[in-house]
C-alpha cells in the first residue's frame, strides 16, 4: 500500500516529511486535511494524531506522528535508495554526530524560527491579527545568536552532521524558508557559512518540488 501523508502542503511540518520522501524517491499520497473546517481536531483525525496536528503518516494500517520521527523512519526504511539521509546502523560516531545535528534544530533553531513564522505568517491565517513586532525582534535576535554559532560549525564542515547532507540539515528548511520569505533573509545572509549552507538546501530538487506543491 502506498504511504499516505495526512497533512497540508502549506504546513511546515508536512513539508518536513514530504522532503524526506522526495529525497528518497518514495511514492506517496498526500491526503489533504482541511484546517478551515477543523478536520485536524475531528475524532477521526485524533485517532491518527492525538494532539490534533499535521502530519500523520499511514502505512499498512500503522499510524506514525511527529514529523521528525516520520522522516527518520523513512530515511531508515528506504536506506538503500535516493539520498542517504542518515548514517548506516554500524557507524556509531556518525550516528552521534547526526543526532547532535538533529538536536541543534530542535533545541535551538526551531523555537525562534517557528515563533517568527507564527508572528509573521500563521497568525494572520488564523485571523489573529498582525505580528507583534517586539516579539519578532526578540526572536530575530535569538535566531541571530544561534546562527552565529551555526556559522562557526559550518566554517569547518559543509553540513551540520559532517561533510554530507542529512536530515539534520533538511529539518531546518520549512521554518528557515518562512523566516527568509517574511523579512528575515538578512539573518541568514549576514552569516556567510550559514548563507552558503541554507542556499544549497533551498536549491535541492526536493525543496524546489515542495515549492511547486504550493501552487
Ligand atoms: N511536533 C509536531 C508539530 C506539528 C504541528 O505543529 N503542526 C502544525 C502545522 S506545521 C499544525 O497542525 N497546526 C495546527 C494546530 O496546531 O491546530 C511535528 O513535528 O509533527
Image (cartoon, helix red, strand yellow):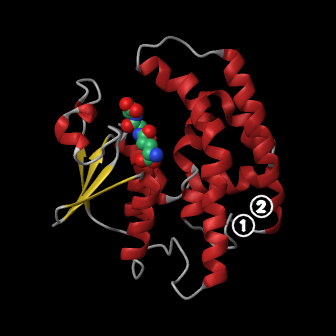
Quadrant in the picture for residue 12:
top left
Q: Position of residue 62 (x, y in %)?
A: 22, 62
Residue at image position (46%, 13%) is 128
Quadrant in the picture for residue 169:
bottom right
Q: Position of residue 166 (x, y in %)?
A: 57, 67
Per the rendering, the mark at residue 154 is 2
Q: Are marks 2 and 1 in contact (CB under 8 Å)?
A: yes
Q: Position of residue 15 (x, y in %)?
A: 42, 48
Residue at image position (59%, 85%) is 91
Q: Is residue 27 above or below residue 114?
A: below
Q: Is residue 72 above or below residue 210?
A: below
- Which sits in the foreground, 187 or 59? 59
Q: Position of residue 83 (x, y in %)?
A: 48, 73
32 relative to 104 in the view: left or right: left
If the image is split into quadrants, where does the C terminus sit? top left
User: What secondary structure is found at the residue carrying circle 1?
Assistant: loop
- Which sits in the foreground, 104 or 82? 104
Amino acid at each position: 500500500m502506498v504511504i499516505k501523508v495526512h497533512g497540508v502542503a502549506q504546513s511546515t511540518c508536512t513539508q518536513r516529511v514530504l522532503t524526506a520522501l522526495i529525497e528518497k524517491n518514495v511514492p506517496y499520497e498526500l491526503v489533504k486535511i482541511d484546517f478551515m473546517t477543523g478536520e485536524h481536531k475531528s475524532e477521526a483525525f485524533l485517532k491518527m494524531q492525538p494532539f490534533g496536528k499535521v502530519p500523520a503518516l499511514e502505512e499498512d494500517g500503522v499510524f506514525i506522528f511527529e514529523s521528525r520521527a516520520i522522516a527518520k523512519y523513512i530515511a531508515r526504511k528506504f536506506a538503500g535508495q535516493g539520498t542517504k539521509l542518515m548514517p548506516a546502523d554500524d557507524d556509531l560516531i556518525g550516528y552521534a554526530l547526526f543526532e547532535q545535528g538533529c538536536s541543534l534544530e530542535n533545541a535551538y533553531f526551531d523555537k525562534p524560527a517557528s515563533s517568527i513564522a507564527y508572528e509573521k505568517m500563521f497568525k494572520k491565517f488564523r485571523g489573529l491579527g498582525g505580528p507583534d513586532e517586539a516579539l519578532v525582534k526578540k526572536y530575530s535576535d535569538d535566531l541571530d545568536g544561534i546562527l552565529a554559532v551555526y556559522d562557526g560549525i559550518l566554517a569547518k564542515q559543509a553540513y551540520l552532521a559532517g561533510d554530507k547532507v542529512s536530515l539534520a540539515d533538511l529539518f531546518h528548511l520549512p521554518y528557515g524558508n518562512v523566516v527568509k520569505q517574511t523579512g528575515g533573509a538578512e539573518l541568514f545572509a549576514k552569516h556567510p557559512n550559514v548563507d552558503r549552507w541554507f542556499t544549497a538546501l533551498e536549491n535541492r530538487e526536493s525543496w524546489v518540488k515542495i515549492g511547486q506543491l504550493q501552487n
